[in-house]
Image (cartoon, rainbow, N blue to C red):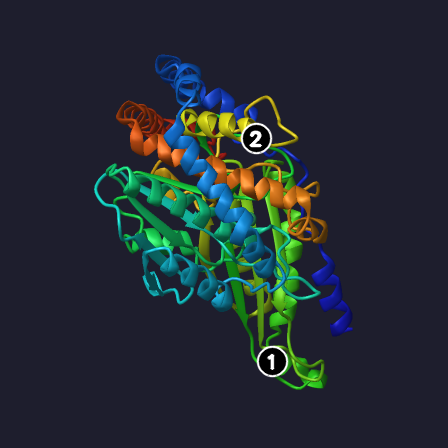
Amino acid sequence: MVRRRVALALAVALVSLSAAVLAQETATERDAGRGVLEKIDVLERSLDVPNIVSRLTGPNDSRDRVVARAKELMDKELLTMADDIATHPEIGFEEKRTVQKLTDYLKQHDFDVQIGVAGLPTAFVAKYKRSSGAPTLGVILEYDALRGTRGPFHGDQHSAQGPVGMAAAIAVAEGLSQTQTPGSVVVYGTPGEEIMPPNAKTVMHQAHVFDGADIIVRSHSMSTTSRPRAGFGSCCRNTVGARYTFAGAPAILSAGWNGRNALEAVIHFFENVDSVRSSIRPEALIQGVIVEGGTTPGVVPDRTVADFSIRYPDEVYLQQVVEFVDNAAKAAALSTGTKVKIDHDGKELDGVSVATLNELAFAYLKKFGATNVLPAPGHPEGFEETGSVSRDIPGASIAAQSSTAPHHTYEMDADNLTNVGHRGFTIDAETMAAILFDFATHADYRGAVKKEFDGVKSLFGEYQSALKKAYQTPVVPDPK
Ligand SMILES: [Zn+2]
């Protein structure tokens, strides 16, 4: 019986009723944010991004040499390394072999390497020794594999991000050094993108690892070639990762009234969440799994644990959703005589995206031959998933098509080793090298990026205030 109930609870798939995935895509967000979105439009028009892009992507021998060097590194050594990492997958915070490979290569190419930054053993920072001064160009490398029932696998192609980012960083660093152009190149190794806690990038940011970077780029797998529009947003809705730990008291099953059943509590918790869905806006995604459900049917389980991912398109209403889920857990504990501990142990929130970087990257992606190109810009999103770094430092996530399959699949993993993967990774490296080079060598371009980033960022508070007004909670009177 108990076992059957565990199986049932584990099988409860708590999914949203809606597939809306875009920030500022709900009618409420669009209405509340109208004034802010108009101000972003005015800012964009004042920058004349198409003109900037056509100027920078024109003929430029020095840039072409840097791009060619990035391609050469990919062709000669780094695609082989990407294949090797893809076939030796390591899950988040256990990426020791991968970090060794990446940092060895960086050392061979004149980078000073520090492994184990911000208290994370598989996080690292590497600085190029032969160039210095402003601006500081940052490149984020990710390398964790997904956890799967068949073992770790690189179904999100993070295996290639290290080699791609290194090709761009080395090519640009060498180019600046050879031409005695000022500019520093820093590579950040950020572990565990796929799991929290902790949010590695947030932890590293709070430890001031990214301080001083004027721009940060990274690559990521995609089945299309696209770019976000300017504004605030997140790839995958704003998210709170939460852990609910229930404590009961053990007793022999035949006299269960002498104990308090933590398994009954966690099952109630899931039922409570499901029972209030009609009171929650349909764009919410609330998904939970029971990671500890007891050890034996002979004893009343005195400890259970459920992990939840709670998502909403914006972080303002997300707080209300989180409160519903927390209260569902508290109610379950109250009704079963158990206790619950709630940890909100990770957040992924809106970042800032800027057209000056994303449109330039998109133009280079096309120029270098990226495939399956989506003509219209997508919703705004920060260049990294936590929103912490991408709120403070301008950047871009570079994504040429590198697979024909959706994210987090065995098919995308297989594409790591095929032509579509190799071609996409090489174009990513060339594009990253090109935009970093342009950023380092054009002061007016840096000024435009900064103006846009500061302008968009300054409107974020106004947007959130407007949302707070839009999401009023109903007045519930005391019962008489
Ligand atoms: Zn990923």
For the N terminus, give its image quadrant.
bottom right
* 441 with respect to 235 (left or right): left
Q: Is 145 in front, or is 298?
A: 145
Disc ID at residue 116:
none
* Residue 135 left/right relative to 277: left
**Residue underneath mark 2:** 226
Query: Disc count in the image?
Result: 2
* Res 214 → quadrant: top left
Counting residues from the start of the chain, the first of labels 1 and 2 encountered is 2
Q: Is residue 1 left or right of residue 352?
A: right
Image quarter for residue 115? bottom left
Res. 479 visible in picture: no
Amino acid on which disc 2 is placed:
Ser
Q: Which residue is mark 1?
A: 259
Residue 410 % position (x, y): 71, 54
Gap in angstroms between the C-alphas marked 1 and 2 = 56 Å
Asked if marks 1 and 2 touch (Cβ < 8 Å), the reply is no
| Label 2 element class | loop
Q: What's the residue type where badge 1 is placed? A: Gly
The residue drawn where x is 33% and y is 56% is: 111
Q: Position of residue 193 (x, y in %)?
A: 50, 54
Image quadrant of residue 292? bottom right
